Image: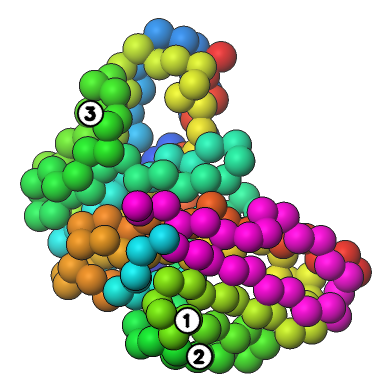
């Protein structure tokens, strides 16, 4: 019941195209966090969503939390080569942070 | 200043050896973790410590023994290394507050067992 699935597993896009990754849970989430891991790097916190239907923006990134708090999405508008990396959603369960399976984004110039 | 630092960054060792990875955080956080990231990039929690006390052990083999001498340090000792232990190990920490807190990760230790 704690598994957090992400789709797609991989995405290759041309620079300038949009990209979306989806995070789905079988149980209601109290919150959802998003992290980015550059190739060879470590996960870095991007944002946290708490409220049902919440939408937050960071420049070209838009984060959404579903109305039922069972899914979330990260949308990148007009990708750039600097967006390359693996994007993880994560749910906090009291003393641990459970990560989704991740979506690896490759951007071709 | 590095917030969460791990050493070493790379570790290559033979099967059967014992090795340790050290982690220190200077953020004043109460909670520290060890995560294992496999070749498919799955990030799996291994241990969670709160104020030097073990909170979570996610069915990790007994060959893995974390030690927290104080709340700023969480070291990982691995006995009798196996090929399947090859992975990137990340240390992380979180501020107090059990629900809405983010994790800060170290740069990772790439362990290769040959």
Between A23 and B7, the one lying in front of the other is A23
In the picture, the quarter occupied by the C terminus of chain B is: top right
Residue A20 appears left or right of B46: right
Secondary element under disc 3, as helix, strand or loop, is strand
The residue at 28%/50% (across/down) is B33
Residue B13 appears left or right of A51: right
Q: Nearer the viewer, mark 2 or mark 3?
A: 2
Distance in Å between CA atoms under marks 1 and 2: 12 Å
Q: Quadrant of residue B27?
A: bottom left
Q: Nearer the viewer, mark 1 or mark 3?
A: 1
Q: Where is residue A75 in the image (x, y as percent from the top left)?
A: 65, 79
Q: Nearer the viewer, mark 1 or mark 2?
A: 1
Q: Quadrant of residue A48?
A: bottom left
Residue that badge 1 annotates: A66
Residue that badge 3 annotates: B65
Provide the major secondary structure of the magenta segment: strand
Q: Where is residue A97 in the image (x, y as percent from the top left)?
A: 33, 58
Query: Which sits earlier in the primary sequence, circle 1 or circle 2?
Result: 2
As displayed, is residue A6 above or below residue B20? below
Query: Label for residue A24?
Result: none
Asked whether the beta carbons under mark 2 and mark 3 sit within 8 Å of each other, the answer is no
The residue at 85%/80% (across/down) is A16
């Amino acid at each position: 019941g704690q598994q957090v699935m992400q789709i797609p597993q991989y995405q290759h896009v041309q620079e300038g195209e949009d990209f979306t990754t989806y995070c789905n849970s079988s149980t209601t989430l109290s919150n959802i966090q998003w992290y980015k891991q550059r190739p060879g790097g470590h996960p870095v916190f991007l944002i946290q969503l708490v409220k049902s239907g919440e939408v937050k923006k960071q420049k070209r990134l838009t984060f959404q939390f579903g109305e039922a708090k069972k899914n979330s999405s990260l949308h990148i508008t007009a990708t750039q080569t600097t967006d390359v990396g693996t994007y993880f959603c994560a749910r906090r369960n009291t003393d641990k942070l459970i990560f989704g399976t991740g979506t690896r984004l490759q951007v071709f110039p | 200043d590095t917030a969460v630092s791990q050493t070493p960054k790379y570790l290559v060792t033979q099967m059967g050896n014992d090795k340790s990875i050290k982690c220190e955080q200077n953020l004043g956080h109460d909670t520290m973790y060890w995560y294992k990231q496999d070749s498919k990039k799955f990030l799996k929690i291994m241990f969670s410590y709160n104020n030097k006390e073990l909170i979570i052990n996610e069915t990790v083999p007994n060959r893995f023994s974390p030690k927290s001498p104080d709340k700023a340090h969480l070291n990982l000792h691995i006995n009798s290394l196996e090929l399947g232990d090859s992975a990137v190990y990340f240390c992380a920490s979180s501020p107090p507050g059990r629900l809405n807190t983010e994790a800060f990760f170290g740069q990772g230790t790439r362990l290769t067992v040959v």
